[in-house]
Amino acid sequence: MATARVSLVAHVTGATTALPAKQASYTIEIFGAIAKAAVAIQDELAHAALRGRLGTTGESNVSGDSVKKLDDWGHETVVATLAASRACSLLVSEEAEAAVEFNVPGLVVCCDPVDGSSSLDVGGAVGTVFGIRPERALGSGREQIAAGYVLYGPTTLFVYTVGRGVHGFTLDREKSEFVLTHPDITVPKRGKVYAINEGNVHTWHPGQRAFIEYLKTPDKASGRPYSLRYSGAMVADVHRILHDGGIFMYPADMSDPNKPKPKLRLLYEVAPISFIAEQAGGRASTGQGPALDLIATEIHQRASILVGSTDDVARTEQFYKEGP
Ligand code: AFP
């Protein structure tokens, strides 16, 4: 028997029945808007070299990263579709120093429109990441009512949670519609893959260094060594981990132990990915505790993240606690 075709918006509508009515309808509209932006972004990515959309704009964003033309274009696209949804009151975007106000009642969206920019000019996989919050951008990650990411690779995948599991949808390009293909994504309890920018090893906490050494040390009984897979685009790396298990890490630079310097952004990278990981039965930590418990006090705040299989994240925390 052929299975029924379930669209993203139909699925979100079914999954948001427990939310207050207004919140549910805003959430559905926002998912529709982000899906529309994602369809446009995947098309622009596919044709970027032909449309003169590779390279940089010459500007830097608030994080000091040089802005790629596609970063800018992705931001404008998300702004336009959210504005048209009339369901988003405020957008925090990696590409805008101040939050964008839409002057309508609605929910707050925190978004990195095109994450993994270093892969753009080489045709690598990149993503869109977002979290949705009820009233304010700042506060704990546990205030999020929804989160998701879009992975632009050989196929375009939309993965989301509203606190009722994690579900994945593949873009049917002919119909410009996301269709359910990966229901109930569950992270294996333990994996065989780690993802980290190992070039930064000399800046890590000693426990972090010892953990990576542990993963690389052969031991048949515990399935070591692990394999390293790292693309430089969090969505692509985390998606692999959610699927196959293992751990993605972006620890803080601890060159000055009194001034840890994390890199990833809390509101539109760490918090949404942590919500998704927990909902998929995995774990997300800062090394000291659950990443979702972090309280954002600034919109472009940065945070560390260790995310993936519960056993692998728990073991990293143990190394942080006990050291080498
Ligand atoms: P952008 O936000 O500039 O696109 O950077 C990507 C990213 O935030 C995340 O997606 C990657 O995992 C990480 O940075 C890669 O950083 P390194 O290049 O330092 O490994």
Image: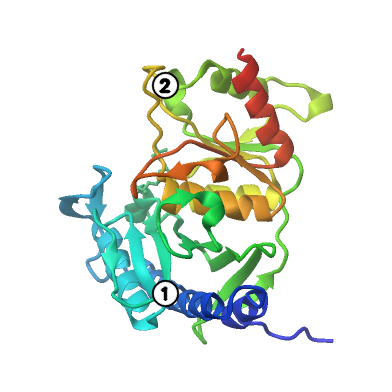
Q: Position of residue 82 (x, y in %)?
A: 37, 75
Residue 239 appears in the picture as rendered: no
SS of the residue under disc 1 = loop
Residue 200 placement (x, y as % from top left): 42, 26
- Looking at the rendered structure, the number of numbered marks drawn on it comes to 2
Specify the quadrant that holds the N terminus.
bottom right
Q: Is residue 167 above or below residue 180?
A: above
For residue 106, the mark is 1
Residue 276 position within the rendered picture, expressed as x and y whole percent measured from the top left = 60, 55
Q: Which residue is mark 2?
A: 254
Residue 115 lies, in percent from the top left, at: 40, 54
Q: Is mark 2 within 8 Å of ligand 1?
A: no
Front label number (2 vs 1) = 1
Does residue 208 appear left or right of residue 246 in this picture?
Answer: left
- Quadrant assignment, res 50: bottom left
Q: Is residue 105 left or right of residue 100?
A: right
Q: Disc 2 marks which amino acid? A: Met
Residue 95: image tag = none
Q: Classify 150 as above or below 204.
A: below
